[in-house]
Image (cartoon, grey):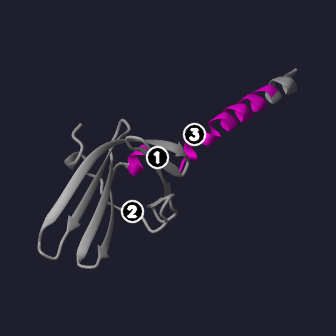
Amino acid sequence: MKILSKLYLILCCFVCLCACHKDNDDTLTSDSLLGVWEFQKEEGSTQYTFQLVLAPNSRAGENVRYKYSSGEVTSSFNERHWNKVDSNTIEIEESTTSVSYQLTSDNHLVSNTDATLVLIKISENYGLYLAE
């Protein structure tokens, strides 16, 4: 009987450990994603900047800015929603579509539809764009 109780205890511990095994496996955690992610490129004499802002409670925003050689700057900001799809993917919901981004091993977000769109985290201060 003593052996059965020890086996039962070992089995219970094993089941508990296996049940919790996936809890800490996610590469993406909300805290590591929250902040401002940026992509920049030059198109002729125009500088293009795209910022993706991720905030708590699935709130997100996209800031697009063009700076022309004349010094003129145009900018637009649109609020969005985001969610975690799996351990390495997030999805940004737009008005009629959604865009997915993959977190790479070097902590960049890469668009699933345009591999040249690589976002680098520049700040954790999402509050500059999305108030709580």
Looking at the rendered structure, the secondary structure element under dot 2 is: strand
Q: Residues within 10 Å of mark 2 (few under 14, many from 20)?
A: many
Give the mark nearest the N terminus, 3 or 1: 3
Magenta stretch containing residue 29, yes or no? yes
Q: Quadrant of residue 118?
A: bottom left
The amino acid type found where label 2 is placed reads Leu
Q: Nearer the viewer, residue 14 or 127?
A: 127
Residue 114 placement, left or right of 2? left
Residue drawn at the location 20% of the way across and 49% of the way down: 128
Residue drawn at the location 82% of the way across and 29% of the way down: 7
The amino acid type found where label 1 is placed reads Glu
Query: Which quadrant holds the N terminus?
Result: top right
The residue that mark 3 highlights is 23
Looking at the rendered structure, the secondary structure element under dot 1 is: strand
Q: Residue furthest top?
A: 1
The residue that mark 1 highlights is 91
Residue drawn at the location 31% of the way across and 61% of the way down: 50
Between the residue at mark 3 and the residue at mark 2, the CA separation in whole angstroms equals 27 Å
* Magenta-tinted stretch: 8-33
Between the residue at mark 2 and the residue at mark 1, the CA separation in whole angstroms equals 14 Å
Q: Is residue 89 visible?
A: yes
Between the residue at mark 3 and the residue at mark 1, the CA separation in whole angstroms equals 21 Å
Looking at the rendered structure, the secondary structure element under dot 3 is: helix
Q: Is residue 28 visible?
A: no
The residue that mark 2 highlights is 119
Q: Residues within 10 Å of mark 1 (few under 14, many from 20)?
A: some
